[in-house]
Image: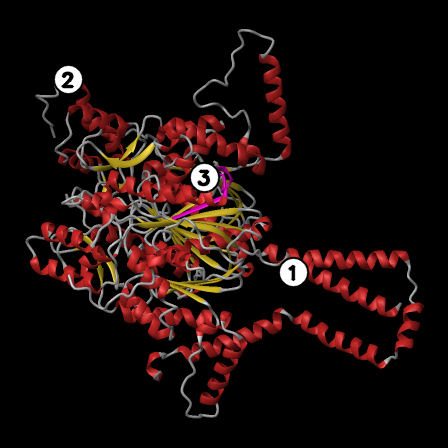
Amino acid sequence: MSQATMPDFSSSVKLKYVKLGYQYLVNHFLSLLLIPIMAIIAVELLRMGPEDILNVWNSLHFDIVQVLCSSFLVIFISTVYFMSKPRTVYLVDYSCYKPPVTCRVPFATFMEHSRLILKDSPKSVEFQMRILERSGLGEETCLPPAIHYIPPTPTMDEARSEAQMVIFTAMDDLFKKTGLLPKDIDILIVNCSLFSPTPSLSAMVINKYKLRSNIKSFNLSGMGCSAGLISVDLARDLLQVHPNSNAVIVSTEIITPNYYKGNERAMLLPNCLFRMGSAAILMSNRRSDRWRAKYKLCHLVRTHRGADDKSFYCVYEQEDREGKIGINLSKDLMAIAGEALKANITTIGPLVLPASEQLLFLLSLIGRKIFNLKWKPYIPDFKLAFEHFCIHAGGRAVIDELQKNLQLSGEHVEASRMTLHRFGNTSSSSLWYELCYIESKGRMRRGDRVWQIAFGSGFKCNSAVWKCNRTIKTPKDGPWSDCIDRYPVFIPEVVKL
Amino acid sequence: MDILCILSSLLILYLIFKIWKHIDSKRDQNCYILDYQCHKPSDDRMLSTQISGEIIRRNKHLRLNEYKFLLKAIVSSGIGEQTYAPRIYFEGREESPTIQDALSEMEEFYIDTIEKLLKRNKLKPKDIDVLVVNVSMLNSTPSLSARIIKHYKMREDVKVFNLTAMGCSASVISIDIVKNIFKTYKNKLALVVTSESLSPNWYSGNNRSMILANCLFRSGGCAVLLTNKRCLSGRAMFKLKCLVRTHHGAREDSFNACVQKEDELGRVGVHLDKTLPKAATRAFVDNLKVITPKILPVTELFRFMLSLLLKKHRRSPSKGSTSNVAQAAPKAGINFKTGIDHFCIHTGGKAVIDAIGYSLDLTEYDLEPARMTLHRFGNTSASSLWYVLGYMEAKKRLKRGDRVFMISFGAGFKCNSCVWEVVRDLSVGECLGNVWNHCIDQYPPKSLLNPFLEKYGWIREEEDADTFKFRT
């Protein structure tokens, strides 16, 4: 790898290491002080022979009061220690929405609709065909019912009914899987980027399931495909503050109101890629859920590149020349995604890489900067830190770019590619479909670490690190249950249409 | 013996250290308002009676009945002559807004307020750790929070949340997020930006329950700086005491009280149902039930319980006793002034303020800030609470130790409230940047009569809808 690919990686990481070391020293000062004391005591004990130790033991006056006091102290201290640790946040279970077969949009249907709707601009139709050929999508992706009409009927009512269909089905499934009662939900976070009616989607969920009146609900929107991890971040922060609580996160994207009806090419791209999907996730910090939880949240890092103008404008909602609203994806999307990922990696690297990798990186850094040796900058191997990777299925190009940057093998990105093929780009919920794929393939074992990376408009790069809590049996139901045996499929570069 | 002594003393020292750290961390969990800045749009956006009349007339779908209804609504709204509207209303383009209009409206607001706020407090955008933006009716890609980050070049690791569709109570929800983050993370500075987007939400039809929203909402917004840094607590204005959220979405009638939907002809508007006041009252009562024990002194609570028991005892033996429990807006029977000094009521409309005043048994002095805000700035949705607070500050009512009770309602139906304690004496010195500074001496005005009645009162006499013609 040439030096140009990772420009400011080294300097920012160097500072972070110094900071980390200093923080470690100061935070554990007292504990570090105890080490020499323990060492002295151990040396003393070793110097004295076994008889001397017996004499010392006999000479101790075992006052009942002293014994009680010291044992009480020990118990008290251990309680205080355990209580002051930050609460572990678990992912108990999650469920992904499987759209009905009637909503399927094979290539033939999509192109036929495209030709009829865009009959005045054959060049745009051809553009869409080229995109679809190279998209990496399969024949089973789904669009909501309103979009199947010619022309599509994106009314607010239809959008609401799509929201109800995808969200309620996923939540019903989640309730069935976990045995959770609606009235036991303490926190509800709903994220849907492009559709936010009044009352909010979170209020709609509260209304349908008759949730408690003191529920803490939040409705995030406009945060793009990375909003799922932003919701997880908010849930984690809330679960640190509220003991014995659980949180339900609903991640979805409602396609109906956002189907671009014009013929501007850059804005037709989302039509080809975005598909219907949603996921409902149950998180908890209860000790009792420790045994049945699937994953434990280890780290979550958010990076926002909005300060950079180019990053900001790369996913932009605007009106075209005829006043039709659509989302413009810039050509620099890949480069910007790569840069955002690098910014994210510099923060998460020190947290997850094993000591060996960090040491190697430090050594190569010292060698290059201090001794000016002509070594190549060492790129840490993230495959040593994680067993599974869930890269947001934003599009084929995104997955290719990340595979190259992180030096991953085909098997590592298989979950992302297959999710893109089977479900399309379902925005914030795609990470959960990918996780479900890995579980359905029976690859998830206890102790495995998963890295979820998502990108979003703005430009954001968020990543979460989960640790598998128990070996997960292949699920009998779920979005992949009927087709997992057909996967992985070989996806050609170009599917001739 | 000595070894045991050493070990015990070491353990005791460690225990004391841990307890001290625990207490120390609790001190850093307070949520302080460092400063806030409300937005006063430029005077060329002032909505006078004349212009309001013109705007109403531009809507070709309205007939005599709708005009009568509107007149009644506007006259009884309590809104004055100096409220602000988005620019496209003045340009005649309210029925065909573009995305750029909505974004410019928001830009005008946040560039003005955040600039003033940061400059006054000598802070840089890079110092902000948490950003929460809540604008109910605007959903853009990238989000408004991303736009703010881009404009001010904030840090990469800023924690940002963009809330939408949570109605007029969204600022209290944003404060809730910030409060929770402050409990986990130390030494943080948060910026809450709250506003409402009117440009893309003009209703161009004639469904009565939907045109009401057109007349009541006005432009406005606020940016609030919050912190849990101990070093800044000396400069802080308010400290959060408690925050309670109540959500009545489980009830069908509450949920459907305020819904954004399409009318019969497919035009999108916000439907305000007739049952909205009842839903609001129910949610308010439930919210009070939870927050009252947290904010009132024990003596008052005992007195209230005693009086309740006596009332029940008195009612059961007698037959024709007047029971004032079965009223639509029940009196609380509890004296809130024992625990609260100032009341910040969401300026949802004159009816809302009157209802809350009645149920909490408040005087005109208590309701004055809310009424004056409604008159001067109209219903600015989520940010209205901060304008009311600004009025109290400008009138020099806020003394150290005073408690301010903020009540807000939102679609869904929610009632969120919180109590702030005044940390610094705000009744001396000038309040820099207060939106009321230029006109506080004119308030309260002698008459709150709406000039609409004078100018358009003749509509009430018109009977024939078919031959009706608008007279200028």
- Residue B416 image label: 3
Q: Earlier in the sequence, mark 3 or mark 1?
A: 1
Left of B400 or right of it: where is B209?
Answer: left
Q: Which residue bears the numbered disc 1?
A: B21
Q: Secondary structure at mark 3?
A: strand
Outermost residue to the front: A485
Quarter of the image that includes the C terminus of chain A: bottom left
Outermost residue to the left: A120
How far apart are the alpha carbons under marks 1 and 2? 76 Å
**Mark 1 against mark 2, which lies toward the viewer?**
1
| Residue in the picture at 38% in, 45% down | A170
Residue B19 appears in the figure: yes
| Residue in the picture at 77% in, 67% down | B10
- Residue B463 image label: 2
Q: Which residues are magenta?
A: A179-190
Q: Secondary structure at mark 2?
A: loop
Which residue type does callout 3 highlight? Answer: Asn
Residue B33 appears in the figure: no
Chain bearing tag 2 is B
Left of A99 or right of it: where is B124?
Answer: right
